[in-house]
Image (cartoon, helix red, strand yellow):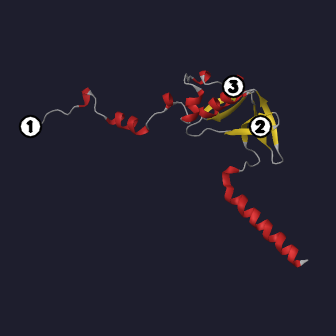
Amino acid sequence: MSVQKTLLAAGAFCLAGTMAHAGNEIPVAGDTHIISRDGQNFRGSHRIYNRMSDGLIEVQYCGRSYWVRYATVAWTQLEVQQNYVVRVEYNWGKGWRPICDHPEEQVTLKDLGVDEDPRVVVQNDGASVRRVNRFAVIREAFRPGDGDKAAKSYHGN
């Protein structure tokens, strides 16, 4: 009997270590995703967020604000084009609960001002027209303009 308990404890320990190592790959209670399904079969998902962060844009699904990547909106459109069903779903710890149907009808790339093909947006992990190089903006801000030229000094002629 003690051998069985030892094996059970070792198995639980290994399983806990595996789950801890997986980190962000395993959805935790409270995660919200757009999930694509073929009937009842899971196809894929993209996480959507409840607060703002770099690289995310605010959208509204069923009257509630979320923050998503451009690639998520593009992916949603592509999944629907392939006749898969997409929904906003919430992980409540014991499975997934639907929150909102047809997110593809509520937010599109065109709504976000993106005219690129959804496949290009997914491949680039975002809209290429929206990308701004922060260092280029900073460099441009410190570049002297026409009125910023120093006057010649007595020693500088």
Considering the numbered disc 3 on the image, is that residue within a helix, a strand or a loop? Answer: helix
Residue 59 lies, in percent from the top left, at 65, 29
Instruction: Please tell me the numbered disc located at residue 81.
Output: 3
User: Looking at the image, how many numbered discs can be counted on the residues?
Assistant: 3
- Give, as a three-letter code, the residue at label 3: Gln
Choose between 14 and 96: the one closer to the eye: 14
Viewer-side label of 2, 3: 3
Which residue type carries mark 2? Answer: Glu
Q: Is residue 111 left or right of residue 26?
A: left
Q: Residue furthest bottom?
A: 2
Mark on residue 89?
Answer: 2
Dividing the image into 4 quarters, which one contains the C terminus? top left
SS for tag 1?
A: loop
Image position of 119 with respect to 50: above or below: above
* Image spot of residue 101 (x, y percent): 78, 28
Query: Measured from the top left, where is residue 149 in percent x and y?
Result: 22, 31
